[in-house]
Image (spheres, rainbow, N blue to C red):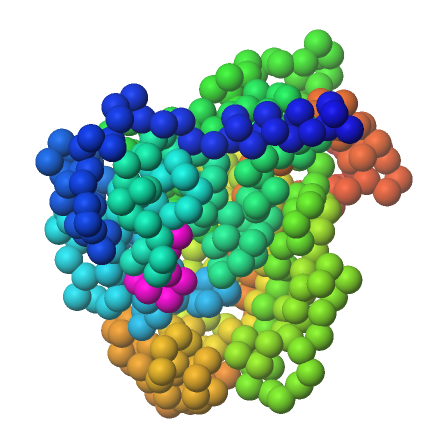
Amino acid sequence: MHTRFTLLLAAVLFALPAAAAVDHRELISGPVSKGEEITRQCLECHGEDAAEVMKTTHWSWSAAQKMNGQGSIDRGKKNAINNFCVSIYANEPRCTSCHIGYGWKDASFDFSDPTKVDCLVCHDTTGTYKKEPTGAGQPAEGVDLLFVAQQVGAPSRVTCGACHFFGGGGDAVKHGDLDSSMEFPDRNLDVHMAAEGNNFQCQECHTTTDHQISGRAMVVSPGSEDHIGCEKCHSAEPHRESVLNRHFAAVACQTCHIPAFAREVPTKTSWDWSTAGQDRVIGKDQYGRPTYDKKKGDFTWGKNIVPTYRWYNGHAGAYLLGDKMNPAKVTELNYPEGSIKDKTAKIYPFKEHTGKQIYDTEHNYFITPQVFGKEGYWKTFDWNQASAIGMKASGLQYSGSYGFAPTIMYWRINHMVAPKEQALGCLDCHGDNGRLDWKALGYRGDPMATGKTARRK
């Protein structure tokens, strides 16, 4: 018991942010009542830092990227379609509670105003700073802003996780490999972040220069090439066994070293909006998670999930706002690019999230409904009104006719790296009950059985 307590205490201490080298108690003064008042004091010394922040995708929620065989496209969280809450258009006060700024409540937000930069959301070391869930990025009521500002320090798993662990409105909802269990993981959950392992903070891999943080989420920046990988620290031949090293040409490290995701906290695996609005009993599954909500429809959740495996060459495509879709088919809202014939592609693990969401039956494109606010669907249960308001905000025509169509999203699995002794073995993929769908990957069957291992050109 003593050893376990010591390890837990060490995990908590090591995961907390480091205090700044300069004592800010002498630099930040009160009284203060608004986040912007803190930022104005920060700008007296850190004006250049605010200018750097305002050049990042964390600020703009968008970036120029090449995708779908087209030229440069301005694409990001701000204009993406997803199968969770669909779109931020007309829903900004709720969605932008995870923005690194103050006050993005609608299209009038001034992205050029440095006083709107929220310094505290990344640099809090007290663990007491919170954003108002529906406040367009403003601090939550009751937060002692002066206390937080005087204790600022380096970002940590806790500060990064405040948004990235809780995206989609709850713990583990979106990613599957990022959730609250990663704040203080043990070695079995993640060898890199565990205190008894490497005790990495996020920026150990997501290296940062001038506030530009390396790495991109495939769901919002599918065309970006700013990826980080295992090769930063590990060689292309990390194993003592040559057979394993040869796999590296076609298999991503994550495929073998992350056997499952959502290891401790269940993640959402499907969302059916078409059943919303019904007066049904709110049920819960074996994990205690809701399976129905009148505001949102039906859900499913999963834990200890075996990933889906697809070829991935570092690039991806995505459904773009206003694209035509076929309601009789499943629309891939984002998808990894690559194939068995692509020498740059590797078999990579993904979380699949399926959905059924609203679309315009005359224009055959997905609708961006307003779900939040007094006129939103969550208050009125009126899809027509929610659609009209949301489509006006996103600049698309709404015919007045709607239906629901199936969708799917793919989330890359990069975290929850298991200890090497828990990595996949040969029979996990090549056995009678192997986890890989060889034909879906383009093989005739298990290449160990067919002898056809070199179909790639």
| Left or right for 233, reference 265 | left
In the image, which residues are magenta? 130-136
In the drawing, does residue 105 fall left or right of residue 294? left
- In this view, the residue in front, 345 or 210, is 210
**Which residue is found at the position 74% from the left and 66% from the top?**
285
Residue 343 at x, y = what percent?
53, 30
Q: Along the line of sight, which residue is nearer the eye, 116 or 335?
A: 116
How would you classify the magenta stretch by its main secondary structure?
Answer: loop
Which of the 4 image quadrants contains residue 192?
Answer: top right
34 or 220: which is nearer to us? Answer: 34
Q: Position of residue 96 (x, y in %)?
A: 34, 59
Q: Is residue 207 above or below residue 351?
A: above
Looking at the image, the residue that sits furthest to the top is 240
48 sits to left or right of 318: left
| Extreme residue in the right direction | 432
Residue 198 lies in the magenta stretch: no
Residue occupying the point 55% across, 86% down: 277
